[in-house]
Amino acid sequence: MKTLLILSVLLSGVLAATAAAVGAAEAAPKEQPKNIQVPVVKEEVLAGEGPEVISPEEEVSSPEGRFFFCPSGWHKFKDSCFLYVRSGYTWNSAAAHCLNNGGSLASAHDVFDYAFLQELTMREGGSTAWIGGFYFQTWRWVDQSPFSYSNWLSVQSSTANPCVYLNARAGWSNASCGGGRPFICTRKISPC
């Protein structure tokens, strides 16, 4: 019961902070100053190549570069940017770090999302990484998207081990939220 209360308080805090961040992002000015050039990162995930930074001149001619960009150090996949953080954080600290960077811990909704997260983890030299799955009455994603795809390698007691981490070699598992691990943040691509 105490664990359930703690998790509900943590979830309420994350949801409130997410709502505040979304409100602040929507209220923020959408234009960039004309004298700042932001590099665009292109990903070739399926080919196994690393990110390629393109110049501002190429950015204008590329449909992808004209409309969307990821911040430096983030990797583009589908309509989102992803950041692998090598430092070991608890699940809650990792979630807060992602939130402070305008995103959330990553979620996977199909085999392609999982394969990208797995490949990113291995490319960054990791073997595991916190992702946004957690247990509160049922399995959920911290970004409030449906937990409709699962890729469990192993499942332990969900009440004692409510936080989900990705295994770079196969699937994901759950563990106590207090252990330090690298993690993956995600955020939607910002239009220019």
Image (spheres, rainbow, N blue to C red):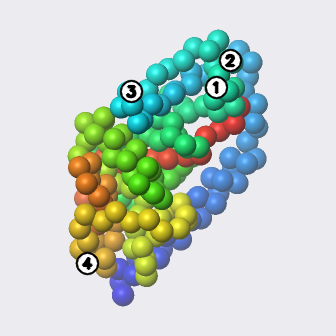
Q: Position of residue 186 (x, y in %)?
A: 50, 47
Which residue is rendered at x = 34% and y = 63% of the image? 151
Tell me the number on the disc at residue 122.
Answer: none
Q: CA distance from mark 2 to mark 3?
A: 21 Å
- How busy is the neighbourhood of tag 1: few (under 14 within 10 Å), some, or many (20 plus)? many
- How busy is the neighbourhood of tag 2: few (under 14 within 10 Å), some, or many (20 plus)? few
The first of marks 4 and 2 along the sequence is 2
- Whether residue 22 is visible: yes
Q: Quadrant of residue 71?
A: top right
Kind of residue at badge 4: Ser
Kind of residue at badge 1: Gly
For label 3, the residue is 50
Q: Secondary structure at mark 4?
A: loop
Tell me the number on the disc at residue 61.
Answer: 2
Comparing labels 4 and 1, the label whose residue is closer to the camera: 1
The first of marks 4 and 1 along the sequence is 1
